[in-house]
Image (spheres, coloured by chain):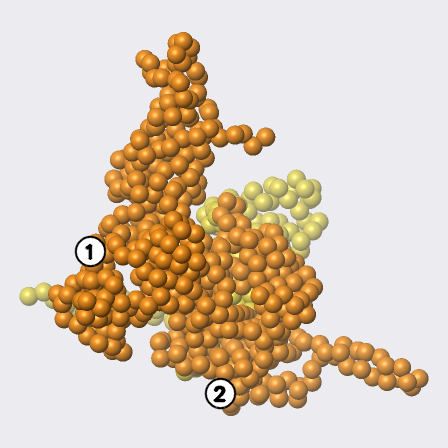
Chain colours: A yellow, B orange
Amino acid sequence: MKYRFTRKQLCIPYVAFLILFVILPLLVICYYAFTNGEGRFTISNLTGFFSSQNTIGTLAYSTLIAITTTGVCLLIAYPVAYILAKSKLKKKSVLLTLFIIPMWINFTLRLVALKEVLTMLEGNLAMYPFLNTIIGMTYDFLPFMILPLYTALMKLDDSLLEAAYDLGASKSTVFLKVILPLSTPGIISGITMVFLPAMTNYVILDMMYNSTYIMGSLIGSYFNAYDWNSGSMIAIVLLAIIFVITWASNGFQEEKSNRGALL
Amino acid sequence: MNTNIAENIIELKGIKKYYDNFMAVEDFNLEVKKGEFVTFLGPSGCGKTTTLRMIAGFELPSEGQILLNGNDISNLPPNKRPINTVFQRYALFPHLNVFDNIAFGLKLKTVNVTYKNNAGDAIVRKEKLSKKEISEKVKRALEIVDLEGFEKRDISTLSGGQQQRIAIARAIVNEPEILLLDEPLGALDLKMRKEMQIELKSMHEKLGITFIYVTHDQEEALTMSDKVVVMCDGMIQQIGTPEEIYNEPNTVFVADFIGESNIFNGKMSGKKKVRFCGEEFECLDDLPVGADVDVVIRPEDIEMTAVENGSITGYVQSVIFKGMHYEITVKSGKNEIVIKSTKSANINDFLGLKIEPEGIHVIHAETNINIFDGVITAIDKVAFADGEFECDVTQLYPGYKMYDNMLVDTEGNELNIVGTQVTVKVPIASVSMSDDIEVGSTDGHIVSLIYKGDHYHYIIRTKSEEDIHLHDPYLWNEEDHVSIVIPKDAIELSLRVSEE
């Protein structure tokens, strides 16, 4: 007779994985964050985080970079996604693929190439650190913004736009009152997909000009200096921020979809 | 027809719409009076929705003019036209509730409000409607569509019929001059549809707005309209009241599309006399004697009588009970005749059929000859309708003879005829079709079929949109891909005089 796994047994590897690689590391980070070098409980790491010019400044800078990147991505991606979704072009899938193709090329290679191009244009990359960071991030994250927007706009029924137009709305009103609200789910998932990695990604900055002015690289530098406690605390704070943002945007989305699904 | 311009709310003059090579609407002329209920009726792809979309402003006509109260609006965008549309699949905004859906147009609307300043001059200002006005109008619109108290409801919680009503409310709340309805009942079930037909009709009477309605359902068109525009292939076939288009169809297409008909080939045999099914009948239509005609008889206009009283006789082939009546098929000679009667009959009964002159409707036969522009491509070949056919070219040049594959005169001089422009005539009766594409010289798709008692009349359309008419005793399907066979001796050629 064949042996059949029960559902519980099938869960075991996943539970083991979760415990080993998610819950335990989190607990370890928490432990380090709230202890000092001698292993005694302390909240000095937390107060240290908020009293240090260095960490607060980096947090603000990271947030600024993330917000700008997300904004630029949204501004570029929305028209592109709209044109791709609504045009009657027969080859639009080819166009869409062209926008996504960079994602298939090795990340490091892409950045090295971008760095070369920017060096050619600007001479010294260190002269425009913020601009270069935004360019690098946008280049990297743009497809993640285009895809959810494209999907949301594809689902938009043309007759709704015609109906609004027919009821007296000008083209801009049609956009503000119909297209924009109906593509909000796409905008939110696009923002989530760009903002969060933009907040923590330090490889881009690192490769562009060895900067340490961003959260991810800050954590790295503490760990390299064997100050695991402060490093862990930064990670915890970042986790909390991301958690709050995700929760807020999900809440917004749910409220939206509830209005449509309440039967 | 009355052409008093002041009365016409909308006029379409010579409207044409083409996309690349495809002609969607050809030469559409129509006048609609204020308060009329006009229906565009036709099979799918006949151009009725395209015409409606041109009136709404979603499509611009390639040629022609649309006049609203005498002003040309052909190129105005939809938001600048005092016309609202009820869409086929409702197109309600899913992110707004019922109130906001209906108020969508009202919130954008501005009205002229007249003030008096201190000097006593009247000043006209454009103002938006107040919240109170809007909510009152929405309430009234909901009352009209019988959905009072639905303001706060979400669109997705409504049934199809309710959504349809909201869509209507959303359009009429703006008090448009014309309401366009694009198959608005198509998605509803039969019972709901019948109910909505009556409601729409009474709404039309109450509101006094001009309705332009698009449907492919002939019963719907007859039930609701003041005026029906029957369309086929981008062209108007007939404009008339429901009674007119039912009782006096202009073309065989209309007769076949509206209601059920017996259609026969006939010939005028005397003054107000027509011959078909092997007998002569009196009729009311006065057409030239000897003219080829199509005879249309509604199944309910044929009376079953004793053999000696009937003008034609036949055997009952089938009897189907349809609730209100029986549908009886009688075979008379080679012709099948369908009768609707409250009386039943038995299969194989031999009976007489009586048709009153009022029941016989005679239409000029569209054509019994196919005419094409062709060109001679070889000594025995002519090309037309996307194909190359064998033909006898000696008929073009009296006095010439075929000799050794050359056309020579009596003195033996050769005549080069390749490239000569000719007019080709082929009698409908001698064309046949085959489902083996290799057999014929050209091919196309069946675009129309009409049953005529003992055969079907088919129209085959070739790649370059040449139409070939032919008769066939068997039933083929629309859209079938067939090849066309024309025997050599059926092709009649005549020299075509160049147009320059």
Judged from this view, the residue extending furthest toward the top is B411
Query: What is the three-letter code of the residue carrying label 2?
Result: Asp
Label 1 crowding class (10 Å Cα cut-off): few <14, some 14-19, many 20+? Answer: few
Question: Which of the two residues, B300 or B486, is positioned nearer the viewer here?
Answer: B300
Q: Taking the image as drawn, is residue B11 in sight? A: yes
Label 2 crowding class (10 Å Cα cut-off): few <14, some 14-19, many 20+? Answer: some
Q: Quadrant of residue B6?
A: bottom right
Question: Which of the two residues, B82 or B256, is positioned nearer the viewer here?
Answer: B256
| Picture residue at 65% right of the left edge, 71% below the top | B7
Q: In which quadrant will I find the N terminus of chain A?
A: bottom left
Residue B217 on image: x %, y %: 40, 68
Compared with residue B297, is residue B422 higher up or lower down, i.e. above or below?
above
Residue, disc 1: B333
Question: Which of the two residues, B11 or B148, is positioned nearer the viewer here?
Answer: B11
Compared with residue B217, is residue B478 higher up or lower down, i.e. above or below?
above
Residue, disc 2: B146
Does residue A246 appear to the left or right of B109 in the view shown? left
Residue B25 on image: x %, y %: 52, 54
Badge 2: chain ID: B
Of the image marks 2 and 1, the number of the one nearer the N terminus: 2
Mark 2 on the same chain as mark 1: yes
Name the mark nearer the viewer: 2 or 1.
Answer: 1
Query: What is the three-letter code of the residue carrying label 1?
Result: Gly
| Picture residue at 36% right of the left edge, 58% below the top | B273
Residue B184 on image: x %, y %: 46, 72
Q: In which quadrant will I find the C terminus of chain A?
A: bottom left
Secondary structure beneath disc 1? Answer: loop
Badge 1: chain ID: B
Secondary structure beneath disc 2? Answer: loop
